[in-house]
Image (cartoon, helix red, strand yellow):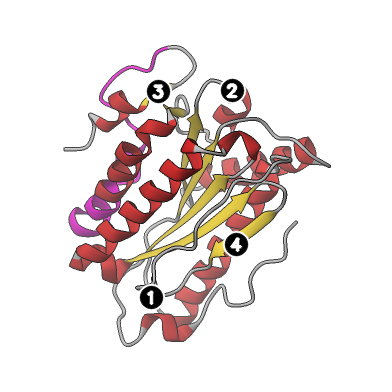
């Protein structure tokens, strides 16, 4: 498992604010198949999401974001903390391996440390979001063993209402059978094309705003307004839920 960043929690991140927090960890596939237009659209979608968070008073003060990538290795691209005005570092795709399980396990470590920090500071929080986006299947040394460990950990947290999972597949090469198992509450994974990243991140931004501003429940983040078809839920159907 990748060593967690030492600065996963820093009391100075919060200033004097005690506003209830929503921690969100993006766990993103940067394997070789994401090269070119997909990784370009992913970067653009992330930038738009962070801009929307900063543009809203409620989400700016309540939403904590971290970003992990998994490709040739697992990298913590952006640890939890204040969102920099300098913007995101450019996320690049690598040429080998897809250590999805290791990425998820690292994300869960970051979220657990963040929750511990909230408790230490006496800050209330909404249940964390884990947003997993992949266009393939686990590949690399111990990839399947790590994936099984990650699935078990996610399932236990979800069943105990301690985690909200967005399991998202990109394109036609996703192992939807594996991806589906990451969540026990979502009937089917969410399916997108790389061209839908903008719409997907718009949905995530709108949903985070609804949670911190309107008290939208975790269950509503799983319940869709349309019936899923096939092995996944198309992002257009998923997006219809957002009012």
Q: CA distance from mark 4 to mark 1?
A: 24 Å
Q: Residue at x 70, y 49 (%)?
A: 102
The residue to which callout 3 is attached is: 233
The answer to whether mark 2 and mark 1 are in CB contact below 8 A is: no
Q: Residue at x 70, y 43 (%)?
A: 99
Q: Which residues are magenta?
A: 207-229
Which quarter of the figure has residue 12?
Answer: bottom left
Q: Which mark is residue 123?
A: 1
Label 3 or label 2, whichever comes before in sequence order: 2
- Give coordinates of residue 40: x percent, y percent: 45, 44
Q: Quadrant of the C terminus?
A: top left
Residues packed near mark 2 inside 10 Å, few (<14), some (14 to 19) or many (20 plus)? few
The residue to which callout 4 is attached is: 76
- Give coordinates of residue 4: x percent, y percent: 66, 67
Which quarter of the figure has residue 126?
Answer: bottom left
Q: Secondary structure at mark 3?
A: strand
Q: Which mark is residue 173?
A: 2
Q: Secondary structure at mark 2?
A: loop
Q: CA distance from mark 2 to mark 1?
A: 41 Å
> Which marked residue is nearer to the observer: mark 3 or mark 4?
4
Q: CA distance from mark 3 to mark 1?
A: 35 Å
- Give coordinates of residue 147: x percent, y percent: 70, 39
Q: Is residue 209 magenta?
A: yes
Residues packed near mark 1 inside 10 Å, few (<14), some (14 to 19) or many (20 plus)? some
Label 3 or label 1, whichever comes before in sequence order: 1
């Amino acid at each position: 498992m990748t060593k967690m960043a030492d600065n996963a929690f820093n009391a100075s991140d919060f200033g004097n604010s005690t506003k209830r927090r929503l921690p969100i960890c993006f766990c993103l596939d940067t394997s070789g198949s994401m090269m070119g237009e997909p990784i370009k659209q992913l970067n653009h979608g992330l930038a738009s999401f962070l801009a929307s968070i900063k543009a809203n008073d409620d989400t700016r003060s309540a939403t904590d974001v971290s970003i992990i990538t998994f490709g040739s290795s697992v990298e913590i691209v952006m640890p939890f903390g204040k969102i920099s005005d300098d913007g995101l570092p450019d996320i690049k795709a690598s040429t080998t391996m897809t250590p999805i399980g290791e990425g998820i396990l690292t994300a869960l470590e970051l979220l657990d440390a963040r929750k511990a920090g909230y408790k230490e500071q006496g800050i209330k929080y909404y249940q964390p979001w884990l947003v997993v986006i992949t266009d393939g299947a686990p590949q690399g040394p111990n990839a399947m063993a790590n994936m099984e460990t990650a699935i078990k950990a996610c399932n236990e947290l979800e069943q105990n209402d301690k985690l909200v999972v967005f399991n998202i597949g990109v394109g036609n090469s996703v192992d939807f059978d594996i991806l589906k198992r990451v969540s026990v509450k979502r009937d089917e994974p969410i399916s997108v094309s790389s061209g839908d990243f903008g719409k997907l991140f718009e949905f995530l931004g709108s949903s985070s705003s609804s949670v911190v501003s309107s008290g939208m429940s975790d269950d509503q983040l799983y319940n869709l307004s349309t019936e899923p078809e096939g092995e996944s839920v198309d992002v257009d159907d998923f997006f219809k839920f957002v009012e």
